Image (cartoon, coloured by chain):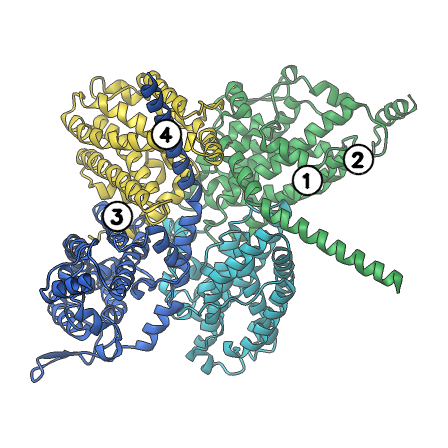
Chain colours: A cyan, B yellow, C blue, D green
Amino acid sequence: DDAVARYALHLGDDALILAQRLSHWISRGPELEEDVALGNIALDQLGHARSFLSYAGKAWGQTEDDLAYFREEEDFTSLHLVEQPNGDFAETMVRGLFMALYQHQLYTRLVHSADETIAAISAKALKEVDYHLEHAELWTLRLGRGTEESAHRMRRALDKLWPYTAELFQDEPLHDELEGVAVRPSTLRAEWDEQLLDILDRSELAVPEVPAALCWGRRGEHSEHLGYILAEMQVLARKHPGATW
Amino acid sequence: DDAVARYALHLGDDALILAQRLSHWISRGPELEEDVALGNIALDQLGHARSFLSYAGKAWGQTEDDLAYFREEEDFTSLHLVEQPNGDFAETMVRGLFMALYQHQLYTRLVHSADETIAAISAKALKEVDYHLEHAELWTLRLGRGTEESAHRMRRALDKLWPYTAELFQDEPLHDELEGVAVRPSTLRAEWDEQLLDILDRSELAVPEVPAALCWGRRGEHSEHLGYILAEMQVLARKHPGATW
Amino acid sequence: IAGQRRFEAIIADDSRIEPRDWMPEAYRKSLTRQMSQHAHSEIIGMQPEANWITRAPSLKRKAILMAKVQDEAGHGLYLYSATETLGTDRDTLNNQLLTGRAKYSSIFNYPARTWADMGAIGWLVDGAAIANQVPLCRASYGPYGRAMVRICKEESFHQRQGFEILLELSRGTEAQRKMAQDAINRFYAPALMMFGPSDQDSPNSQQSMAWNIKRFSNDDLRQRFVGMIVEQVKVLGLSLPDPDLRYDEESGQWLHMDLDWDEFKRVVSGGGPCNSQRLARRREAHEDGAWVREAAAAFARKQQNEKNQHDQKAEVA
Amino acid sequence: IAGQRRFEAIIADDSRIEPRDWMPEAYRKSLTRQMSQHAHSEIIGMQPEANWITRAPSLKRKAILMAKVQDEAGHGLYLYSATETLGTDRDTLNNQLLTGRAKYSSIFNYPARTWADMGAIGWLVDGAAIANQVPLCRASYGPYGRAMVRICKEESFHQRQGFEILLELSRGTEAQRKMAQDAINRFYAPALMMFGPSDQDSPNSQQSMAWNIKRFSNDDLRQRFVGMIVEQVKVLGLSLPDPDLRYDEESGQWLHMDLDWDEFKRVVSGGGPCNSQRLARRREAHEDGAWVREAAAAFARKQQNEKNQHDQKAEVA
């Protein structure tokens, strides 16, 4: 089913780009334990991406690698938020918190999707995202309440990344076609806001007062970052078209 | 002449990769005047690269763009030093100082090359490298003698980049074939050392005591950085083979 | 009073106010705002184009693009200097930009997503800027007018280069042609909005006209610009994404589609696709450069001290 | 004296020394050096491989590579813990690495230039590491031996994955095959040098053997390794870049080419292609992470204080 495949692509692209970004931390973390932790999260996200992309690809006779390596920028459907640079550790944690809360709620609902494969992948992913959320929450507490510098960096990261959160909850015509299969993003907003507020509150941080950015990653209109991400990710595979690895 | 072309390629590749690295500073400099100054240097280096690559390409029926965009990593002959990341402003200045001193001496000698084209390009380049050297020297003085932090950053940059300077002065079999046309790199070392020592002395900095790195960029054996540089530089041109722009 | 009378006479005479001349506070304030916004636009405007320098598809285009972005830094520098003659220094102006209190042209909050955007920005964005700026060469404030003369010269050069990029793409492969049309589609409406809302919705316009800063209404300038690009797009063999576009013989005007002023307001007030990124980049460059500026200042002080000591010794001797 | 006698008895019995047991200072020092070098090698060894994570040519390979590099961080962590049982804490060990006072395996100072290096590093470098480490599973110091058991298991898994990468390349396109052979050419000699100089030139070897830390001589281990890869390279249909390589029936030994020990010494003492880069990356990660570690520590203190206050209140009540 083409619509289901396109939906799986949304989920897969978010996870893939986030994994690609996070993987850069491996060997660069603030302590070895974080190299391991961020590596774990990256690996989980990559796993989810592979499942969703493989499933999407089935509808079109394509493999996960065809989709990851041989699509052009405008064919990707990732959210602007996952495309944002790692920045400092605070930025990575804020991005991680926003996404973990979002994916957690999304997968919690998708477990009941009428599409069995999506339900099954989501059930597996949910268990792992549990840990991602715990990790992000713990660091938000630590950095928000740690030192003056860490709190300052967290506030800066919140200001910088907040504009990209609105896009997470934008409904697209595709969702109309997938009643019972997909989750309407807009329906996740209230709970996301509530949980975020709770975590930020306990971390002595606040929801920043900056406007939402106009973003349409789902329609293939991406941030200026995606081109660089793909140039790097795809360079080797594209030098050897048709090769296996 | 194939040997002359290969020599022009050395000179062109150094300038091209340095230009590519420097151009990243435009819109990111510590003050607008530096956006302009680093942009100027990048533009000059790109100009030299274009002249040398065009000349090299003539021998092989290739354009400057064929050489810049469609060679593989192992066909590039750039020095490891120019491939090093920009790092902070101190690293960029130290790399700039090392290269400006080197290119200044090299072009000063190449003005008398038996190959007229190389002599002519070098004469033009020399005037511009004069300014690059002045710029690098001024900043070395400012940062070396400025604040404790700036001096610390300069020492760190010197330690980090010094290992790559030995490669600048390595003779290759190619130089044996080009008596009177090329300059034997090893013959530049003494004067380079002397001038560098003088500048560092006046900047209250010292030649670091770290060993030389084993590098063979001229033979196509590059640092781990070059692959990333080329992936970015070549991505668009390679997506549209045969296109004109 | 004498100053005021002199100011009014100069304006009536369509002659020039210079920095030392008396001027009304409102005139000074309005000009400071306009000129610094213009300077900020040049500086922020470097970013979408800098985004393609390292990926430019030919060395020639790379060199042209680098030179262009560098020119924009230069324009920013002139304009900050010109603004400083009104009594506000560059640090203050820069601070207004970094804290989000000052505005800049909203078009730079759209991403430069493909190489063709380098063409569309040059042709449409610089084109609209020139249409706005040519009349400013006669602005009543001398330093502004003179800065504009220099800037307009370089901008027309940039516009031609942008047009050339699109022309080359339009004559290229199918993919290149598509890329060019797509860039025009994305930049057309934002470029038309660069002239600002219709004059009835533009509160400062009338006063600016009275002071001989502004010479034509926003709608007039937009008209003129549309008339120009309608002709040029034919040379490209591409089209403008405007189903309503037609020349109305009766009014002698180009009629174009309604522009989405809600989006415009949203982008101006921080909600464009790239506002956060553009400001963050400026802030990071500023913060990362702090130690460099401090070192340069400390070195300059040391040198001054050494010179003073040397001079004292010379005096004693 | 009783401790000394007990230590000697344990060694004689080929049994295990545990952290609380008495041990000679030289034994402690030698083990601390060896184990921390091993830990540092795991940590620095992450870098050449991390270099290809973002560019891995298939998602499956990307996942495998990520997991591998992560395992290496895990190995580093076990080994630092094991070393800490000898009385030197991790901060001190890390500091020795960052200041260049501690060594790590010199092979990681060579660049990972192509994707095939992921195969060659897995097959040859991990292979040589395993040949070195399997006997260490029986090392007389308990925590070291036990850490080695766990590490060796994962390393064999990594080696097989490396071999698979090369196998896939060797059966692929001409370019892939060439890439694989080139990687083997570059890593062969450095891998053989991982066993260290011949035993007559290796001052610590004898004492290590006497203490039941080391079980076989450097040359013996190298022999065994060469014998193994000679067979495996046939499966790949590729070759080892060693014109002198042959089995000498008489001595029952593999004869290989002379190794360039001058280069080895140069690389060990800081002059490899990537020494500067590898250490700089570790230093930057450490410095950039300082505020994060401080914040975590400050938060932990706050939590402890809150808990103490809470407990006090509970007691009072």
Q: What separation in Å lies between label 1 and label 4 (alpha carbons)?
A: 62 Å
At label 4, which amino acid type do we have?
Answer: Gln
Q: What separation in Å lies between label 3 and label 4 (alpha carbons)?
A: 30 Å
Q: What separation in Å lies between label 1 and label 2 (alpha carbons)?
A: 15 Å
Mark 4 closeness class: few <14, some 14–19, many ≥20 residues within 10 Å: some
At label 1, which amino acid type do we have?
Answer: Cys
Which badge, 1 or 2, comes first in the chain's sequence?
A: 2
Q: Which residue position is annotated with label 4?
A: C303
Mark 1 closeness class: few <14, some 14–19, many ≥20 residues within 10 Å: many
At x 42%, y 28%, the residue is: B164
Q: Label 4: state its secondary structure.
A: helix
- The image shows residue B109, relative to residue A124, as above or below, that is above
At label 3, which amino acid type do we have?
Answer: Gln
Q: What separation in Å lies between label 2 and label 4 (alpha carbons)?
A: 63 Å
Circle 4 chain: C
Q: Which residue position is annotated with label 3?
A: C70
In-image side of A187 versus B113 (left or right):
right
Q: Kindly report which numbered mark, 1 or 2, lies closer to the viewer in this rendering.
A: 2
In-image side of B238 versus A135 (left or right):
left
Q: Label 1: state its secondary structure.
A: helix
